[in-house]
Amino acid sequence: MTASIKAGGRLHGEPAGHGLRRILLKLSGEALMGEEDYGIDPQMLKRVANEIREVMSLGMQVAVVIGGGNIFRGAGLARAGMDRVTGDHMGMLATVMNSLAMQDALEALGLYARVMSAIRINEVCEEYIRRRAVRHLEKGRVVILAAGTGNPFFTTDTAASLRAIEINADLLLKATKVNGIYTDDPVRNPKATRYSKLTFDKVLMDRLNVMDATAIVMCRDNNLPLRVFDLTKPGELLRIVRGEDVGTLVVNGQDAAGD
């Protein structure tokens, strides 16, 4: 693998330790809202970009998928009476807006970033082509994958699973507002306990609210590990890359379940 850009004394493409070389980070659109009621909180955007920079300094290759729920959510628009396909197309465009904002924040920190869209908007971003995306990663660029899968009725969680598999990511990271997966809603049930590790089959069987079923099945069938962690806690992303036990790890295997 060619490595042409140094970061923190390491070459991009060189493993960052603990078997991780390439990760895909899934962010919800709501995560970018921070303390705002709508849209993007500039401070939150800057903080996330800085955490990505810290991870890149270890030589990690990073791809990002961002939702669009802070601007438009296709399913919600459909419930309000809009045609579902039209609503989903609007949601895809919202993810492009978020992705462009993230690209700008990363470049302001001195990183190289590329937005690649599943729908053609060539005037503002690149078209998603798998081999080109991989090449960007190998060159040390953050690849921000926008517009979901490019198809209506599929969530950005499913897009994250799909893209992670396509680019041969070692780990899919799902950023949330809680520090992992719990036996029950920890807000409503203070006795709920956190899983440190469990299987994809248990997530599906118990209908644990992690990602939609399609995304989980894709991870399971392609043996792609998933880690769910708390984005609101600074430094968690870096801790994961360093090999610390953060959040909940979801894998294949009969012996993975445990608190």
Image (spheres, helix red, strand yellow):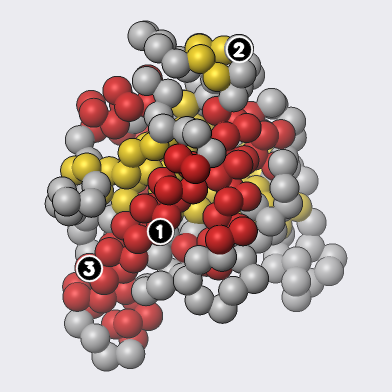
Residue extending furthest right? 191
From the image, tell me which residue sits under label 3.
89
21 vs 124, left or right, is right
Q: Of tags 3 and 2, which is closer to the observer?
A: 2
From where the camera sits, is residue 13 visible? yes
The residue beneath circle 2 is 9
Quote the CA–CA distance across marks 2 and 1.
31 Å
| Amino acid type, callout 3 | His
- Please state the horizontal and vertical placement of residue 77, each as a whole percent of the image: 32, 82
Question: Of callouts 2 and 1, which one flags the residue occurring earlier in the amino acid sequence?
Answer: 2
Image quarter where the N terminus lies is: top left
**Residue underneath mark 1:** 98
Depicted 117 relative to depicted 8: above or below:
below
Residue drawn 38% across and 53% down? Answer: 99
Q: Which of marks 3 and 2 is nearer the N terminus?
A: 2
Residue 95 drawn at (x, y percent): 35, 60
Label 2 element class: loop
On the question of residue 222 being in view, the answer is no
From the viewer's perspective, is 182 left or right of 121? right
What is the C-alpha distance between the residues marked 3 and 2?
42 Å
Residue 196's image quarter?
A: top right
Q: In this rendering, which labeled residue sits more in front, label 3 or label 1?
A: 1
- Residue at 50 percent across and 34 percent down: it is 110
Q: Are the residues flagged by discs 3 and 2 in contact, CB closer than 8 Å? A: no
Which picture quadrant has residue 8?
top right
